[in-house]
Amino acid sequence: MPAPRVQQFGRRRALAALGVLGVSRYVPACGSSQKGPDTGAFGGSGGRGLGGQSGGGDSGAQPGETTCLLTPAQTEGPFFVDSMMRSDIREGKLGVSLGLNLRVVEAGSCAPLVGALVEVWHADAAGVYSAFDVAAGNSQNAAGETFLRGFQTADAEGRVEFLSVYPGWYPGRTPHIHVMVRTAERQLLTTQLYFPEAVTDAVYALPPYAARGRRSTTNATDGIGGVAALTGELSEMAEGYAAAFRMVVNG
């Protein structure tokens, strides 16, 4: 059976189609060789809570939700590049499965921002980003690669969902995921999402992460800072973790 074709859309084309596309579901699988088609996303249900923080990194979708303060912005970093529309961004990268359930709401009203474009990108288990070479500051040469990058448009609840692997570390940074939220008119938020230390320790004791040895940077010593307000809620699943983050923006 032939492999599913990856739908590759530039962000400009996606911005023109904001509000049209929906979100489906997936069944998690660790280290899949699937080449990232837009065939499913993470449901975020079940599992055992593993210590999230309130504020910019809380999970949203709560009964009686009335307080929605702006999520702190953080630097875009050097490794952004125009990506493709898809929910499975793994491209065969090995690692502990990570389902991302992201929700975008407006500050004050807490109303979901339907049709917002949400883009994510992060390093693989070896601390390498796709699309850049060592000359640009990357840990290894990866120009022309597209792994662990993608975008989706928010559904009627303001949600987008991705299937990825737990990010690796590199010197000076604790594990994180970059996020950019846009509408057709403007950029609303650029920030980074983080994880509880206990979860990172458990993940990094497993292959392929363990082969790199002890990480050099923790949440407390991260070079960017502001980690506590951007740490999400994680649930342990049969084959990995589910991570929920709420992002509050000025719509």
Image: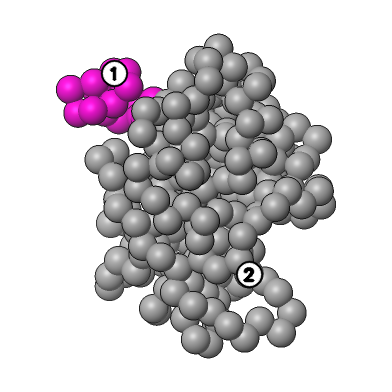
Coloration of the structure image: one colour
Q: Residues within 10 Å of mark 1 (few under 14, many from 20)?
A: some
How would you rate the neighbour count of disc 2 (Cα within 10 Å): few for under 14, some for 14-19, many for 20 or more? many
Estimate the x, y position of residue 183 in percent, counting from the top left: 35, 69
Q: How many numbered marks have been drawn onto this rendered protein structure?
A: 2
Corner quadrant of residue 12? bottom left
* Closer-to-camera residue (247/40): 247
Q: Element type at marker 1?
A: loop
Report x, y in % for residue 80: 29, 43
Quadrant of res 157: bottom right
Relative side of 153 to 138, left or right: right
Q: Is residue 53 above or below residue 166?
A: below
Q: Is residue 45 left or right of residue 225?
A: right
State the residue position of label 1.
Answer: 141
- Which quadrant of the figure contains the C terminus? bottom left
| Part of the protein shown in magenta | 128-149
Quadrant of image for the N terminus: top right
Q: Are marks 1 and 2 in contact (CB under 8 Å)?
A: no
> Residue 86 at x, y = what percent?
49, 45
Image position of 219 with respect to 54: above or below? above
Left or right: residue 32 versus residue 247 is right
Residue at x-position 51% and y-position 66%: 56
- Return the residue found at the far front: 220
Residue 222 highlighted magenta (yes or no): no
Q: Amino acid at mark 2?
A: Gly
Q: Would you say residue 49 is visible in this rendering?
A: yes
Question: Disc 2 on helix, strand or loop?
Answer: loop
Label 2 belongs to which residue? 60
CA gap between label 1 and label 2 equals 38 Å
Q: Main secondary structure of the magenta part?
A: loop
Report the residue at 55% width, 54% height from top: 231
In the image, residue 131 lies in the stretch drawn in magenta: yes
